[in-house]
Image (spheres, rainbow, N blue to C red):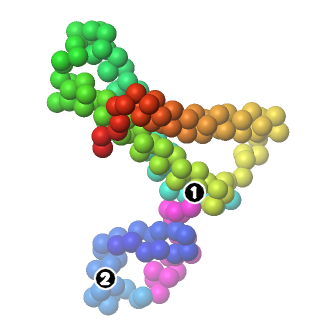
Amino acid sequence: AVRFCGNQIVFVGDKEVMERRRGLRAPQALEEREEGCAMQVFNSAERYGWLTKFLHWLIVLLFAFQYFAGHLMMAMLHGDWGLTTKSVVLNLTMNNWFNWHKSIGLVILVVVVIRLLSRTFSGLPAWAATLSDGEKKVIHRYEQLLYLGMLIMPISGFVYTMAAGYGVHL
């Protein structure tokens, strides 16, 4: 079972839920447990919430797919790795790979926008005390460049695809 407390989620074990249903556990036991609530949904001053962590790793996986698909499509176009434009890889033709690549690019754009909105409204944890002001500035600039790239790549891919008349087939 799942319980929300503030902006946090508490996972209650099945045994505890069954004991409460049978009257073997006092109802206040869960309320006492809520004080030490784990798995925050949003960021706090001390740590990142699970939403930020989930979106981070989702973007990592989506970009890894894009990297793999991009290399695979180029190998098919140029005849590398013994592949041709007629090859079928993981039951997908080259055209299917191109469509998946374009569709996932748009999904990445949506996820990045959600991540930026989440970051804006829930804030960020405090910087590590061991970082100097110079290190904080460098890290902040690199983060800005990464977000800029995560926005520009899908947008430019969409613009180029539409300008070439190929479209995006979801």
Work out whether 73 lies above or below 59. above
Task: Tell me which residue sits at (23%, 16%) in the image.
Answer: 85
Q: Amino acid at mark 2?
A: Glu
Side of 156 relative to 128 (left or right): left
Query: Residue 167: horizontal and vertical position, in percent?
Result: 35, 36
| Span highlighted in magenta in the image | 28-42
Q: Does the magenta segment cover residue 11?
A: no
Task: Tell me which residue sits at (30%, 74%) in the image.
Answer: 15
Query: How crowded is the residue under tag 2: few (<14 C-alpha within 10 Å), some, or many (20+)?
Result: few
Q: Is residue 168 visible?
A: yes
Query: Residue 72: horizontal and vertical position, in percent?
Result: 32, 21
Q: Which mark is residue 118?
A: 1
Quadrant that contains the C terminus:
top left
Side of 38 relative to 120 (left or right): left
Quarter assignment of residue 12: bottom left
Query: Residue 62: horizontal and vertical position, in percent?
Result: 41, 38
Task: Tell me which residue sits at (43%, 75%) in the image.
Answer: 3
User: Is 92 or 122 nearer to us in this picture?
Assistant: 92
Mark 2 sits on what residue?
Answer: 19
Quadrant that contains the N terminus:
bottom left
Quarter assignment of residue 163: top left
Side of 84 relative to 165 (left or right): left
Quarter assignment of residue 162: top left
Q: Which mark is residue 82?
A: none
Work out whether 50 lies above or below 58. below
User: Is 124 or 128 nearer to us in this picture?
Assistant: 124
